[in-house]
Structure formats: C-alpha cells, structure tokens
Amino acid sequence: MEPLLVFPEPVPPELAQALDFGGWAWKSAPDIDSARRDEPADGWVGAIVMATAGAELDGALRLCRAIRNGDINVDSVLLLVNGGQLMELDPHEDLFDDFCVHPFHPVEFETRLKHVFRRSGNNDDIDLIEYGPLAMNLETYQAVIEGKPLDLTYMEYELLKFLAAHPGKVFTRETLLNRVWGYDYYGGARTVDVHVRRLRAKLGEEHANLIQTIRSVGYSFGRSRWI
Amino acid sequence: MEREQEYVLRTVEERGVRLIRLWFTDVLGQLKSVAISPAELDTALDEGVQFDGTAINGFSRIHESDVLARPDATTFELLPWAKEDEPSARMFCDIQNLDETPFAGDPRQVLRRNLDEARTHGYSFFAAPEMEFFYFASGDPSLGKPQPLDRASYFDLTTADVSSDLRKRTIHMLEAMSIPVEYSFHEDSPSQHEIDLRYTEALDVADNVMTLRLVVKKIALERDCYATFMPKPLNGVQGSGMHTHLSLFKDGENAFHDGDDPYGWSTTARQFTAGILRHAREITAVTNQLVNSYKRIAETSEAPPYVAWARNNRSALVRVPVRKKGKAESARIEYRAPDPACNPYLAFSLLLAAGMRGISENYELPEETNTNLFDLSETERRAAGVEPLPRSLDEALDVMESSELVRTTLGDHIFEWFLRNKRTEWSEYQSQVTPFELERYLPST
C-alpha cells in the first residue's frame, strides 16, 4: 500500500500511534522538497498537514497550497488544526479536502482518514465512482453512461470525475478551476463554463441535468447521498 | 509521464483505437494529418514524430527539412465518424525543430507565443467566430458554376430536408468533438449556412475552426454534395464571412467591462479596439488571404470595407454589440472583416497583437461612426478620416509588407514565406483572362 505523507517532522506520538493502529502506511517529511525526493514509485495516497505541531496555520496553508499547485503529486489533503484556528479556515477551504480538530478523538480521526483517503487508502477494490446512470473507472480512465462509453477529452474526464466524486456539493467556478485545472491555468472561470457545456452535450439531453448550474454560485453534480 | 498522456494511452488501449491521427496546420491554414498506430503512440507522446516538412506549405527551409510533430494530449478526441469496429482518434500537434525548440513555420506555435506574450500582462484572449459556408450540389466545380442545393433541386421536394439534415448531423458531430455550437440558417443567400462557435480561449477556438471546416466538408461529402468556405462563390449574393467576437479576460474577469462607464466599456476595450483599427489594413492580407476574399469585402454590407467602429452600425468594420445591463461577462467587440478561408491561428495572433499594441501604446479610439458609410461619397469618407481596407490581395500584401507589427507577430519565417507565396498567387491570377473580360471586350473591341 502506498504511504501517506505527514507534515511536519517530527510527528507527535499520538498521531503516529493513531496512524499505526489504523494500519496506514505513512512517512513524514520536514518540507516539500524532501517529500518530493522521497516520493514512492506509486505516489502518495494523500497528505496530512498539521497546523498544530510547531508550524503555525500560515505555514501549514503554504504547504497545502504547494501541494495544490502540483509541487508534489498528492490528490487529497487532510488538515489538522486546533480549535482556535477554526475561524480562520473559511477563506482557504480550496486548499484542503477535510480537516480535523487536534487534539482529536481517535475514532473521529480514523473516520476522517477513511473518508478522505478511502478511494485509494484501503484499495482492495477497483477505484470506481458510480452515480445513477454514470459509472467511472478511475483505474482505466473510462466513463460510461447507461453502459455506453463516453468519449471525453482529458479535461472533461477530470472535471466529471471531480464533480461526480462529490455529489450534491456546490463548487464555485474558481474552486473548480483550482482543483481540476490547477493554479497555473490562465483561461479563467469561463473555461469552466465551456467545459461544463461540453460535458452536458456529451452526457446527452437525457442526462445533461446531472450537472446543475447554481445561479451566481457555480455548479453541482447530482444530489448528496447524505440527505 | 504526464497524466494526460497516460489518459491517452489508456483510452487507446481500453477503447481498442486502431489509428491515431496527428493533426497540424500549414501556413495557409490547410489541415495536415499523419496517422500512427497504437504501437507507436507511446514514443510519439514522449519524443514526437519526425517527418520531412519540405512538402508542407510554409515548412520548407534551406538547411534542415525534418521537423517533429509533438501531440498535444489535451486535444485527444475519438473521431465520431470512425467505423465502430475501427475506432480512431486525433490529437493536434505542435511542430518543433529537432532540438525541441518551437518551429518558426508552425502557425499553432505562433498563436501560442502571442497568447503567452499577452499572459505576461495578465490577459487571456477569447474569441468566438461565426463560420459561414455554402453547400453545393456535387459535380466538378471547375466545369461550371456551382449549383446551390436549394436551386439545384428545384423540382425536388426533399431538398429542404437534405440541407437541414446535413446541418443537424454536422452539429451532432461537432458536439461529439467538444465543439459546442449554435447555428442558424442564412436566408440571405441560397444554400448558405452559418455555425456560430462559442466563446473560448483562442487556441481552442483556432483548433475548433480547423475541426469544423473538416467536419462540415466531410458530412456534405457523405451526402453527395460539397461544402465550401470560399469567401465569395456566387455573383450577386452575399459571400461567406467569419465575423469574430473578441475579448480579453484578466484575473477571471472580462477586462472589456467597466461598470462605471455609461456604455459599460473599459479603457482596455477602447485601447484594444483602437489597436485593431489602426492596424486593420496591415493584417488584412492574413485575415482575408485569397484573391477571392476581396470580392466579398468589396460590395456587401456584411463585410464592411471601411476602417471604423460603431455600436449599432453594421457598415463599420468593428461593431460593439450593445449588451444588457449587468452582463459583464459578455463585453466584447466584433471584427467583421475575416473570412472563413483564413488561417485561424495566424488571424487570431494578429488580432490579438494589434489590440495589445493599442493597450501598450495607449492608442486613442477615434470617434464612433454613426452615418452609414455606404451612403457617403469617397470624398466625404476621406474628409471623415475613414480609410478603406485594401481592395485587392495585391494592395493588402503591399500594406502588410511594410508592417513591423505583422512581421514581429508572425515571425520572419512565416512573414516572408507568406508574402512570397501570396505574391505568386496574385501574379498567377493577374495573368488570367477572365470570363468577365471575354464577355465584355471580345465582341465590342
């Protein structure tokens, strides 16, 4: 199993223990450069960034941003903060996938780990996203709607994957740009509109409404499974 | 390996793709294609495909004739018209020299370079062309006049269905290739159609124009007729244009919009427009590159031959569409000269460069033209300071040749090759005795 990347070094004993008890493979790194040097052949499963162990919140967010920028190859980030830092997270929520308040309860922590890293974490089964008529095999990069293959470009595939992985969640165009295209893309928010339009055309009239436009906010896919 | 390359390799494998077409464009805007098999794909993505460029228009060089086609994996697309048991796909390519530097004769690289240049100032360039074209009944066009579908099928009740079926199928194919469209049937001329492409980044749009021209022609051939993007195929009826809507975005916002301006129009938009107007004559040889292009510009109101701008005056070269209040994103200008036979990579490069020059040099926008320029006499137009666009390819080439802006934007290689090639085209045309001359002069002189 590919390891989790944990920032910073040294890792506090209660975190190391929780990871070991949960059966997670992990490795710590003091900074991005050494994480890049130590990158395992199959990449990192994800990253845990602590804003409580030495590094202040600003430093932790800088790390998160570097990860989002693609400085290292990590898809999902779990941020650990203390109660006092909670209020400052709101404007930065693009930078991490989930957070957990530290000191944490081991059960909550384990649940969040599974939630954030579940797709590749305990990967006995194939990576699969299924929602109604849509199925995506993340292993083979293929998507089907009602069993019929969809012919997608790479960016259309990535956008659909991202949306379908978070049913019911509303994303702004900016968030989608950052998360799907990365920070270095210049096309601006219109690029997102164009790709959504393309995806809807390819999903076909019947399924075009899987992607909803949320007026003056952005887009969402399907409905949440938790309501 | 980059993820998009992995995506391409995996999709080719999973979908059993048999043939991958690598597309690129010559200097005149002709689509070129090299086909490779899946076995060669890995290396092609990694190292590019080497080929001899001598036979490609505008690729020839004195020393080294081999170039590299580097597939752009983000443009990978399955071809919707391929046979089901023989799936094939295409990717657009950037052309490089063997040392992997951009090849100066590649129009796509020219556009990339100009887009990058605009980006250093924080701008991204968006365009939306309106592509017009004609369908004609098949037959060798060199043998006689082209036959419009509706007229050719005078007695045939099904003809109306033929062209609407053609259009429908074309739209379907384009959508399947990630090219969202809106279309309208042109009533002005028989058998003339228009397909409007949606706003997107100029490089995408230029790729889309190339794809569209192929798809339109391909579908027409399937139905035993042909489609043409020739600017002026018929006497006495309007020709085919490529009116192009343009805007700049900065930090995700439309840089042409300014909520405080009475017209919602920013200084950037004014300067950009001023740049386009000032350099319009210089770039015309590229936006209208055929001898025939100037027969379209010469007479009809949809292709205004006068360098002027206006909000609601279709006789002006640049139109500033009036928009609804609050529609900040749709702030744009419409440049009405180009025709659909142009090389879109080069045309967009020059429009961008001319507009950017207006911004960097703080050009002042001339007064809006409110009169109908067609109603004015030559002297009145001159007095109003309104210049005409070049009236022939020959004149356009003269103006282009003295343009530092065009030379810098296209680069020496393309600039010089284009002038040489087009001078030859003009002199070949000049030496022709036309039916007009025979009809007019043969009996009477």
Image: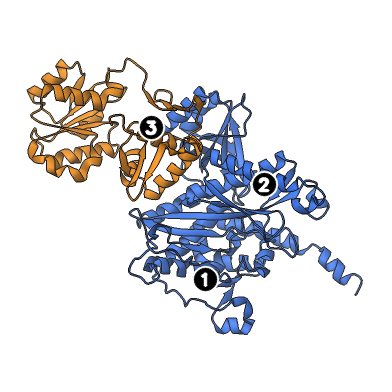
Chain colours: A orange, B blue
Q: Quadrant of the N terminus of chain A?
A: top left
Q: Quadrant of the C terminus of chain A?
A: top left
Residue B265 pos. (x, y %): 39, 67
Which residue in the structure is indicated by mark 2? B164
Which residue in the structure is indicated by mark 3? A161
Give the mark, 2 or 1, whose residue is nearer the N terminus.
2
Which residue in the structure is indicated by mark 1? B312
Residues under numbered marks 1 and 3 in contact, where contact means CB atoms less than 8 Å apart:
no
Which chain letter goes with mark 1?
B
**Residue at image point 14% right, 31% down:** A8
Query: What secondary structure is found at the residue carrying circle 2?
Result: helix
Instruction: From the viewer's side, name the closer residue of B182 and B299.
Output: B182
Same chain? Circles 2 and 3: no
Query: What secondary structure is found at the residue carrying circle 3?
Result: helix
Which chain letter goes with mark 3?
A
Q: Tag 2: residue type?
A: Ser
Query: Horizontal placement of B139 versus B376: left or right?
Result: right
Query: Horizontal placement of B95 versus B60: left or right?
Result: left
For residue B443, which quarter of the picture? Answer: bottom right
